[in-house]
Amino acid sequence: MTPNSLSWLMNDFRDRTEGVEHVLLFSRDGLKLHWDDGLNPTAGAPAATRDRVEYLAAIGSGIAGLAAEASDKLDCGGSPDYITLLFPGRQLLLVNAGHGAVLTVLAAADAEPGLVGSEMVRLIDRLSEHLGIAPRQAGAPA
């Protein structure tokens, strides 16, 4: 499967989930796998805009790694299934998407995190049909 060949699925999720601005599936080590078309680089755009998908993958990978390390050091019993960061202007939500993959969503500040999170789990189920990602299990490392 080629990188971002499932952009149609990501676009569908973004368009039907209220408050979602961008969605990205990446490997635990930060390799971007699939993302919505809004993250695609545009010709002539500033470098920061062209590299949004790379930045989001790197940020998500760092956050997931830090959370896994914190869990290990604090004896929390495994990596978190969900991570939500609330910023004044946006939310960043990360969900364990199966062995070695993480789904990340950038949402509006007023998006309902519970609704977005439940839709993320549904998207992971749909993605697993196309990618062969093992279904996520509570407490499994991201």
Image (cartoon, rainbow, N blue to C red):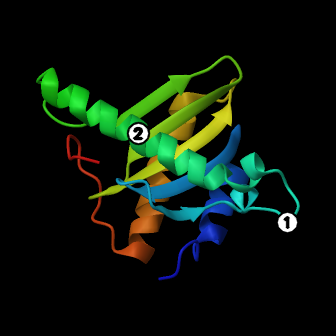
Precedes in sequence: disc 1 or disc 2: 1
**Residue underneath mark 1:** 43
Residue 70's spot in the image, x, y percent?
A: 24, 26
Residue 89's spot in the image, x, y percent?
A: 71, 22
Above or below: residue 110 compared with residue 32: above
Q: Is residue 80 visible from the viewing direction of this image?
A: no
**Residue underneath mark 2:** 62
Q: Nearer the viewer, residue 5 or 139?
A: 5
- Categorize mark 2 by other alpha carbons within 10 Å: few (<14), some (14-19), many (20+): some
Q: Is residue 30 visible from the viewing direction of this image?
A: yes
- The quarter holding residue 130 reads bottom left
Q: Nearer the viewer, residue 115 or 102?
A: 102
Residue 80's spot in the image, x, y percent?
A: 29, 34
Name the amino acid, label 2. Gly
Identify the element where label 2 is drawn. helix
Identify the element where label 1 is drawn. loop
Above or below: residue 69 compared with residue 105: above
* Residue 81 shown left or right of residue 113 in the figure: left
Residue shown at 67% from the left, 61% from the top: 12
Instruction: Report how far apart the C-alphas of labels 1 and 2 lie in the structure.
Output: 28 Å
Q: Residue lying at the far front in this picture: please name it.
A: 47
Q: Residue lying at the far right in this picture: please name it.
A: 44
Above or below: residue 108 compared with residue 10: above
